[in-house]
């Protein structure tokens, strides 16, 4: 056994040197409690850099698409769809692999694939050989790799930290992602001005490589279950049967998937709303998106600071209602002075909702099924851009503000119906 690592009673690992001092230090800062675990610190760095690369790539790729297609918004939506569709459906396969294969290795392999694809895109760009169809294909590959990556990345948190710290750890991971959402686009936009898209893509490839290095430093490795003799389709079906057979898990899956249909389309509609309501330019839009990102970061840190949260099921449903209400309030804003705090609130509510839902899904699923359960949650990341399509059509017909209001009201309605139709969920601890 490595002399620097020893197993804790929960089966997790901590540093042998100075671990008592570190635990005492983190007690002073409860929001960062899970950083006492060495492997979680490396996982957090790997997750934060991974999402930094993703957000930087979104901005850089979007700029390249507009350059190649004479500013076509339809072209942007096509590449987004190419990324979202495999993420929606291949995540189920990713969940099976997260239960069969070592999760650390799955993260490393998928992130390495992203680095390779980004370096390829950079090379095509800098040599002038890039065509629009390249972006469609690479977007599809990126979406597929994300579908393999994300169930393992979420599931491995339970392998690293004990259950009592799981909500804190997942909230800190969400905070790292939201910090990347704030910093990544701004950094990419600045670098494009001075470097051009190709060199920024090379830099993004290096960020992906850094994420691989950080993940490789993780020592905790729970043995994978391996093949049980069943096919992949049978394993996916078993995952759905397992979720259906557990009322708590079924409620959590519903609470994860349905709000994505009504709660997240606002992200895609904010640019159109900003133009209609405020006649915003690029700087104004950046300010609005930053307010939303800061709200998400704040929400994740608030949840990370809470050591004991009782009746988490009831709190989750109430938070879903508050999320919908905040979207309704935002849709009625007519100035920056009201829109900025409203978007801050929307980001905060959505971050608390998603972090808490992810926590409960991990706590209430078994080790051998956790990857498949998390893959159902990861489907929401693919559903988000797909769900924006009907709300975009509504916005074209009756206005973006009205479309946003409808989405928020539907989310409030769903939370209300779920609260009364599923009374047992109130007692979820």
Image: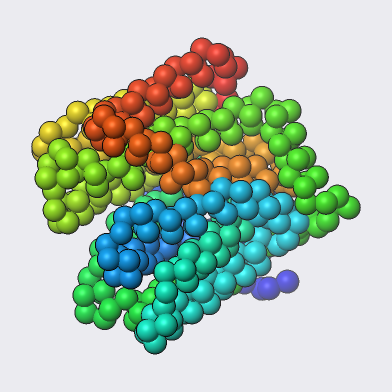
Identify whether 142 is placed above or below 32. Answer: below
Task: Look at the picture and state if 106 lies above or below 353.
Answer: below
Residue at position x 62%, y 58% in the image: 148
Residue 43: percent from left, percent from top: 52, 62
User: In the picture shown, does residue 79 fall above or below 124?
Assistant: above
**Where 327 sits versus 375, above or below?**
above
Residue occupying the point 42% across, 74% down: 131
Query: Camera-side residue: 165 or 193?
Result: 193
* Residue situated furthest right in the rendering: 229
Percent of width and height locating residue 294: 27, 48
Residue 183 appears in the figure:
no
Q: What is the x, y in percent for residue 332?
A: 19, 28
Look at the image and tell me in which quarter the C terminus lies.
top right
Q: Quadrant of the N terminus?
A: bottom right
Q: Is residue 270 visible?
A: yes
Q: Which of the 4 image quadrants contains residue 5?
A: bottom right
Decide if residue 337 is on the left or right side of residue 357: left
Task: Depth check: give the residue in front, 71 or 34.
Answer: 71
Residue at the spot 26% in from the left edge and 74% down from the top edge = 192
Rendered residue at 37%/62% (across/down): 58
185 or 277: nearer the viewer: 277
């Amino acid at each position: 056994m490595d002399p620097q690592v020893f197993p804790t009673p929960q089966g997790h690992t901590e540093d042998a040197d100075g671990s008592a001092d570190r635990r005492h230090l983190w007690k002073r800062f409860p929001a960062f409690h899970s950083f006492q675990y060495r492997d979680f610190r490396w996982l957090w760095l790997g997750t934060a850099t991974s999402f930094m690369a993703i957000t930087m790539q979104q901005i850089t790729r979007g700029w390249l698409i507009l350059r190649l297609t004479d500013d076509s918004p339809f072209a942007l939506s096509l590449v987004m769809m190419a990324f979202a569709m495999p993420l929606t459906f291949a995540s189920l396969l990713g969940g099976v692999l997260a239960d069969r294969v070592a999760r650390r290795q799955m993260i490393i392999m998928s992130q390495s694939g992203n680095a390779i694809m980004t370096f390829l895109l950079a090379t095509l760009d800098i040599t002038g050989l890039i065509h629009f169809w390249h972006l469609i294909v690479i977007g599809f590959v990126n979406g597929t790799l994300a579908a393999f990556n994300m169930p393992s990345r979420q599931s491995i948190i339970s392998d690293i930290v004990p259950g009592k710290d799981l909500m804190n750890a997942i909230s800190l991971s969400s905070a790292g992602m939201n910090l990347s959402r704030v910093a990544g686009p701004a950094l990419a936009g600045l670098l494009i001005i001075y470097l051009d898209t190709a060199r920024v893509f090379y830099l993004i490839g290096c960020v992906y490589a850094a994420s691989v290095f950080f993940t490789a430093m993780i020592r905790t490795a729970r043995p994978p279950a391996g093949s049980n003799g069943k096919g992949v389709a049978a394993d996916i079906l078993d995952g759905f049967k397992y979720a259906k057979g557990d009322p708590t898990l079924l409620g959590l899956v519903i609470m994860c998937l349905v709000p994505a249909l009504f709660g997240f389309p606002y992200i895609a509609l904010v640019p159109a709303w900003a133009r209609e309501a405020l006649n915003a330019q690029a700087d104004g839009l950046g300010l609005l998106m930053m307010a939303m990102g800061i709200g998400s970061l704040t929400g994740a840190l608030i949840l990370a600071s809470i050591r004991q949260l009782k009746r988490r099921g009831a709190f989750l449903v109430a938070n879903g209602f508050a999320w919908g209400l905040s979207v309704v309030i935002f849709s009625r804003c007519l100035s920056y002075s009201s829109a900025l705090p409203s978007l801050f609130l929307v980001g905060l509510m959505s971050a608390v909702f998603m972090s808490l839902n992810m926590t409960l899904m991990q706590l209430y699923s078994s080790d051998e099924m956790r990857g498949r359960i998390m893959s159902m949650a990861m489907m929401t990341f693919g559903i988000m851009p797909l769900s924006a399509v009907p709300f975009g059509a509504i916005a074209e017909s009756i206005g973006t503000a009205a479309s946003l209001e409808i989405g928020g009201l539907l989310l409030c309605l769903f939370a209300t119906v779920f609260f009364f139709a599923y009374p047992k969920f109130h007692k979820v601890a």
